[in-house]
Image: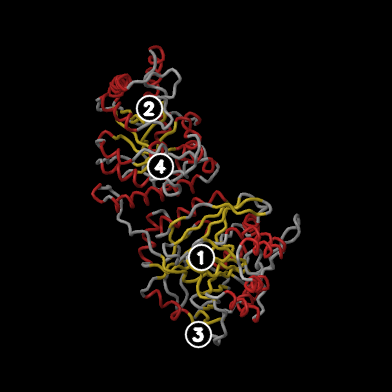
Amino acid sequence: MKTGIATVSISGNLEEKIEAIAAAGFTGIEIFEQDFIADIRSPAAVGQRIRECGLEVMLFQPFRDFEGLPKALRAKAFERAERKFDVMQELGCELMLICSSVHPEALGGIDRAAADFAAFGELAAKRGLRVGYEALAWGRHVNDHRDAWEIVRRADHPNVGLILDSFHTLGRGIDPETIRRIPGDKIFFVQLADAPLIDMDLLYWSRHFRNMPGEGDLAVTDFMRAVMATGYAGPVSLEIFNDQFRGGSPETIARDGYRSLISLMDEVRRQEPEAGVQDLPALPAPVPVRDTAFIEFAAQGEGLEKLEGLLSSLGFHRTGRHVSKAVTLWQQGDIRFVLNAETTGHAANAWNVRGTTICDIGLSVSSAADTVTRAEALGAKPFSQPLGPGEMPIPAIRGLGGSVMHFIDEGALSDVWDVEFLPEGEAAAEAGLMRVDHIAQTMSYDEMLSWSLFWTTLFDMEKAPMVDVVDPDGLIRSRAIAAPGGEVRITLNGAETHKTLAGSFLAEGLGATIQHVALATEDIFATAEALKAKGFEALPLSPNYFDDLAARFDLAPEMLEKMRSASILYDADEQGEFFQLYSKPFAGQMFFEIVERRGGYAGYGAPNAPFRIAALKRLQPPKGMPAIQKT
């Protein structure tokens, strides 16, 4: 299967785009004409450079306003086409994309357009080239792939075919099943793009809000299933117009594009096996995740002592010491925290950069081997470091932002705690914390789509709609990713300014990603009492919050008073109830959350976020005074 991406999809100059596309693993490239024109090199030099990078020049685009023009304009259009054919031949590209006309003088008529394309096909054939016709969703006379196909069919020329773009079909709400009626050999090229569902002008929506398949809300998988059912065996490429991507990292965007394309075609093969997706390596299915196996902190010196004290106040106790390293294991219920004080290796590097920080996440999965196999096929890099005495080789990958993720399954890997740790410490009274409810990853807003794609393409997880969280100094965009049964939940919080709590965490933590961990209890009031007895200090809330709570919800006075005295927040929906309790910040701006879910409540207390943020900010240094993290 040939995979491609249009140069317009990523940022940078043409050379930067070529290098990023090749490094990501694509086999080909679409040359967007503006990128080529802005480059100082000749067409032959550009084509040679692309091939040196192991890429094929799959498509030259776009050629605009061709069909259905009055006589004088029609002659000029054919003249323009001849010049573009010259460029294509120097580039070493044999296929041109012609998008449906938006010219104000363009004339309608299927037969008129078909006659133009028949003549165009003759010109292309003389040069050994082909032309493909694409219906723009906002085309003046042709805005539906069915009409474009009818024009191609009537043109009846072997060098004239159809180009399909998922956005132009799905953005107009056209049933992709209609594609199944088109002969696969007359589809010359396929472009893919997703987009969030937004009610706006089609042209503006397309030019600013397209994203990678799987990042938006369009039925791109259904579209591609229909395409492959025709017998299509040509390239599958991405054409993305996105303001955010235009200012992003070319390498990151290209890797995301490759990940999205391989994941999409893998899903198409699973849902439409008879379609025969060719040359796609066999991949394990998206991996089920069972729970959070461990969370590892890098901590040394005073920061380590403070973290140990905080964990003790939360009812955790040290249950093991590593057989050969300065690493300890702390447990409560099914929760495991690993505290790594090593002075070499990944944890030490993380501590040197950020101070006390979460440096590693371990997930319990159905198959650790399958997880790494799928991750590498989607472009992730494996992670390893030298093993010390008594250590087991646990499969791992590098996530985004330098993060690391290990995988443990029910095989021999599940023995790691008995193999690598010597029992230590005496059992202590716990506080009723049972498991990790969710992990909150903080990132720049520009990184949210990358992280969302990472979780949903690798694991059997689904994304929730984006929500806005109000910070006193800006806006945070938040999206939850969760396993079907909620076994593992991740919240992605995107900051657009360093003035917000999330933004300042990123700035002061030099790119640290995990800002807080939420721990689940079955009785938050009993847990709160146990924590108080252990010296735990809850985040103090404004009294106004509880006065408002009494007005919004029909809560028993005695429950409301218990919540007020323990600083417990509350939310409810038609499915159930949600209780939250927060720690004061530690190690800069990290914190713990304790939650209880009742009934089928599946949210994260979003209405409470502004009040939690305001409470955390009250404990920060005054505005303008730099925060100094003591590690």
User: Closer to the camera: disc 2 or disc 3?
Assistant: 2
- Mark carried by residue 576: 1
| Residue 301 percent coordinates (x, y) | 65, 74
Report crowding for label 4: few under 14, some 14 to 19, many 20 or more residues within 10 A (C-alpha). Answer: some
Residue 131 relative to residue 218: left or right: left
Quadrant location of residue 378? bottom left
Badge 3 element: strand
Residue 332 relative to residue 52: left or right: right
The amino acid type of the residue labelled 4 equals: Cys
Q: CA distance from mark 4 to mark 2?
A: 37 Å
Q: Residue at x 75, y 56 (%)?
A: 623
Which comes before the other along the chain, label 4 or label 2? 4
Report which residue position mark 4 lands on. 53
Q: Residue furthest bottom?
A: 426
The amino acid type of the residue labelled 1 equals: Gly
Report which residue position mark 2 lands on. 142
Report which residue position mark 3 lands on. 423
Q: Residue at x 41, y 51 (%)?
A: 259
